[in-house]
Image: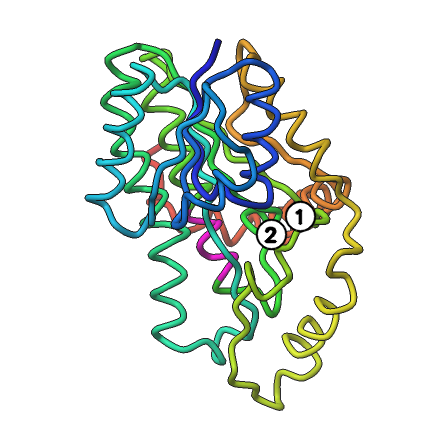
């Protein structure tokens, strides 16, 4: 039996993982800013602890982890799922919008992870699943600031994986593509109110496209949740897990582009070293 600690658990991927973990017989600490939403969805379940947590509040993160340990005695799996998107060109995004996004997507993830890690280190066991995105591997117009937060998640996860592996703790960046969740709805996506006409063909076009594909995305959220329930038992989990055919295609395209870049600029790239003594 595993004990899960899941942020952003009242809806979307978080709620689906809660549902699947409980059905499996695991124990779940499900956190959200409003834990009543969790209680309303899942009822009074003996293996479920609903806890209030705004991930941007580091003190509350420690309190939530303390409640989890007091109830279940351990945390085996941390799912850093809480987060949201920001749509708009980089120049269109305001300072407060950018800061708020980083407080949740990056600093919030750090706060929760740092609160959980002392317990996982004591156990010499644990799994950390950090929700990144296809946008954590490849950025694009309209989502530049959002993607930058997911690039940060990828960098943190790679470092955590190396630091924690000798302690029996594994960290993985989960990289979903476009899944049919509410991510492109106003509940999960902030849209910058500033629109600059010079970006109409780039970020502006993405604004329009987002409306078209919302709730028509190719990815099946239920299948993703099932994959993650099984994934936590993998003996040697990878540092990143791409999910969705669109994510796979994006990674393949970026690999090809990077190969071309290295081939074209190789001489310049290696020319910046000190000359080696003969």
Give the answer, above or below, for where 224 lies relative to 229.
below
Please, is residue 206 above or below residue 6 in the view? below
User: Per the image, is 148 magenta?
Assistant: yes
Magenta stretch secondary structure, dominant: helix
From what the image shows, is residue 234 above or below residue 225?
above
Number of callouts in the render? 2
Magenta stretch bounds? 146-152
* Residue 138 numbered tag: 2
The spot of residue 7 in percent (x, y) is 43, 39
Structure colour scheme: rainbow
- Find disc 1 in the rendering and name its residue: 254
- Which image quarter holds the C terminus? top left
- The CA distance from mark 1 to mark 2 is 7 Å
Residue 124 appearing in the image: yes
- Residue most extreme to the bottom: 197
Secondary structure beneath dot 1 equals helix
At a point 73% along the width and 31% down the height, the residue shown is: 223
Residue 23 colored in magenta in the image: no
Most foreground residue, 226 or 167: 226
Residue at 78% x, 67% y is 212
Residue under the image location 64 percent in, 55 percent down? 182
């Amino acid at each position: 039996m595993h004990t899960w600690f899941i942020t952003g658990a009242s809806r979307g991927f978080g709620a689906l993982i809660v549902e699947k973990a409980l059905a499996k017989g695991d124990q779940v600490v499900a956190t959200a800013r409003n834990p009543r939403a969790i209680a309303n969805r899942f009822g009074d379940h003996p293996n479920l602890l609903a806890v209030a947590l705004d991930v941007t509040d580091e003190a509350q993160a420690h309190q939530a982890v303390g409640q989890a340990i007091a109830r279940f005695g351990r945390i085996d799996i941390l799912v850093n799922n809480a987060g949201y998107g920001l749509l708009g060109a980089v120049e269109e995004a305001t300072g407060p919008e950018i800061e708020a996004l980083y407080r949740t997507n990056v600093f919030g993830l750090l706060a929760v992870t740092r609160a959980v890690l002392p317990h996982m280190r004591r156990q010499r066991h644990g799994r950390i699943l950090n929700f990144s995105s296809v946008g954590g591997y490849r950025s694009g117009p309209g989502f530049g600031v959002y993607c930058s937060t997911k690039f940060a998640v990828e960098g943190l996860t790679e470092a955590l994986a190396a630091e924690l592996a000798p302690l029996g703790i594994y960290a993985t960046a989960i990289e979903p593509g476009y899944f049919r969740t509410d991510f492109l709805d106003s509940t999960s996506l902030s849209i910058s109110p500033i629109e600059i006409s010079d970006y109409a063909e780039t970020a502006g076009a993405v604004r329009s496209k987002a409306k078209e594909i919302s709730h028509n995305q190719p990815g099946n959220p239920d299948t993703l949740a099932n994959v993650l329930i099984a994934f936590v038992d993998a003996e040697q989990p990878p540092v990143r897990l791409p999910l969705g055919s669109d994510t796979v295609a994006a990674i393949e395209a970026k690999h090809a582009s990077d190969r071309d870049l290295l081939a074209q600029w190789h001489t310049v790239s290696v020319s910046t070293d000190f000359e080696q003594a003969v």
